Amino acid sequence: MGIGNKKITKLAEGINESIKTDEALFDFEEYDDSLAERTGYSNYSYWRSTFYVFIKNRAALFFLIIMIALLVFTFIQPILPNQKSPTQIYIDPATNMQLRNHPPDSEFIFGTNSIGQDLWSRIWSGTRTSLMIGLLVAIWQAIAGITIGALWGYVRSLDRFITEAYNVIDNIPTTIILILLTYIMRPSIGTLVFAMCITGWRGMALFVRNQIVIIRDREYNLASKCLGPPTRRIITRNLLPYLVSVIMLRMALAIPEAIGSEVFLTYIGLGLPISIPSLGNLINEGRVVMMVSSLRYQLIFPAIVISIITISFYVIGNVFADAADPRNHI
């Protein structure tokens, strides 16, 4: 036993000598709070990541460029040189009569309509009118639909009341409401916007409500509620950011939908008066002469503009919705 203890003692002394020797070879690093914070830092940005994912889709980027160019040209067209009035009736100097159905040429790029008005100026003026209607309706749908939908989905005491009110309004066909309002009120841009806003919020509100019902009882929302913040803060900080992608998609689709409603109402004679150029008026005018092959340009040109707007907003909205989903961020 004595010999064993001596061997253990010598072994321990050797280890201690080795440790002392090794300590001379190393310097111990001191703890630094700033370095510890740096290791946990991330430069992730939600909107920057959304932008990078969006521009990777070439089709969406192409339609975005087309849409921006169309919007810019639509609003600067009146101030460009040598532009004609969209409401002026031009006279043929040879016959001293209205320059009706004049084919496209260097002076009248898109020709003239059946009463001698410049179709080029009327198309861009009509595009401005229809886009303004679409944007106003989309903004209203976002404000009213998101507000009502968020309260409908999160505040349980309001669920029954809003559900019953929604069912009553939803059982009335949208087309009938639009026709009645535009028939009773004086035809104008304000009348069309008002009629579409009365019915347009329902789809957005129901969609937001259903999405919030799905996520309102998740753990992080329950934990936030236990801290006692106001309902407004929970909705704006916890719930709505989760729905950014789908809300933007609904807004993008609301613009061509509103333009389509304007075209439909004008087509049945309850839209804007002829004195106000709009894509609906232009489509209606082109429909009258579409059976004459030499005059089909009066329908083709506004139809192309409507198609570009509709397809662009559809593609941009869908791709942006995918890009805004954090699960698609790298």
Image (tube, rainbow, N blue to C red):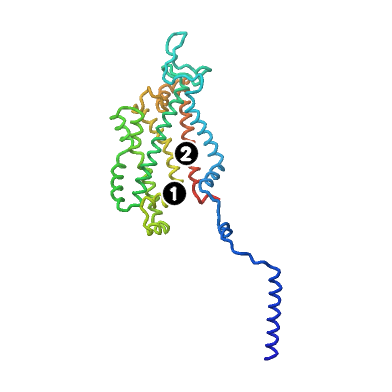
Q: Earlier in the sequence, mark 2 or mark 1?
A: 1
Q: Nearer the viewer, mark 2 or mark 1?
A: 1
Locate residue 288, reporting x and y percent: 40, 22
Label 2, label 1: how far apart the Cα atoms are: 22 Å
Q: Is residue 291 above or below residue 68?
A: above
Q: Residues within 10 Å of mark 1 (few under 14, many from 20)?
A: few
Q: Is residue 66 above or below residue 153?
A: above
Quadrant hosting residue 140: top left
Label number found at residue 314: 2
Where does label 1 land, which residue? 241
Q: Toward the viewer: 41 or 162? A: 41
Quadrant hosting residue 190: top left
Q: Toward the viewer: 103 or 15? A: 15
Label number found at residue 280: none
SS at circle 1: helix
Locate residue 320, reporting x and y percent: 49, 43
Q: Is residue 217 left or right of residue 38?
A: left
SS at circle 2: helix
Query: Where is the N terminus found, in terms of image quarters?
Result: bottom right
Q: Toward the viewer: 304 or 208? A: 208
Locate residue 59, reporting x and y percent: 54, 39
Q: Amino acid at mark 2?
A: Tyr
Residue at image x 36%, y 39%? 200
Q: Amino acid at mark 1?
A: Pro
Locate residue 69, reporting x and y percent: 52, 31
